[in-house]
Amino acid sequence: MITLLRSKIDKIDEKILKLIAERFETVSRIGRIKHENGLKIKNKSRETAIFAKIKKLSKKFGLSHDFVSRLYEMIIDESRKLQG
């Protein structure tokens, strides 16, 4: 039973990593477009909107808002690096 559950976790982890990679690929495309058009990388209103959405979704899925916020802070930091 534990082996099956661990296998399930491994598959979930693979999906999570695939989605993060897809997110970063999309972020890189946005960064190229911003550079081509002379736009700023950091968009405070967009980041505020992301965190508001994350807060709402963390409640929906019964996840710790603090945990999800810290996770997204890291994701957004990496996104800025990719766009820069």
Image (tube, grey):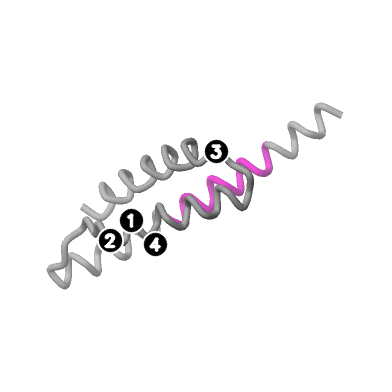
Which residue is drawn at the image coordinates 55% and 54% (left, top)?
A: 57
Sequence order check, earlier mark of 3 and 1:
1
Helix, strand, or loop for circle 3? loop
- What residue sits right under mark 4 in the picture? 26
Q: Are marks 2 and 1 in contact (CB under 8 Å)?
A: yes
In this rendering, the answer to whether 64 lies above or below 20 is: above
- What residue sits right under mark 3 in the picture? 64
Residue occupying the far bottom of the picture: 37
Left or right side of 84 for 67: right
Local crowd size for mark 3, using a 10 Å CA cut-off: few (<14), some (14–19), many (≥20): few
55 vs 73, nearest the viewer: 55
User: Residue 45, which numbered label?
Assistant: 2
Mark 3 or 4, which is nearer the eye? Answer: 3
Left or right side of 78 for 7: right
Sequence order check, earlier mark of 1 and 4:
4
User: Residue 48, which numbered label?
Assistant: 1
Q: Are marks 3 and 1 in contact (CB under 8 Å)?
A: no
Q: Which residues are magenta?
A: 10-23
Helix, strand, or loop for circle 2? helix
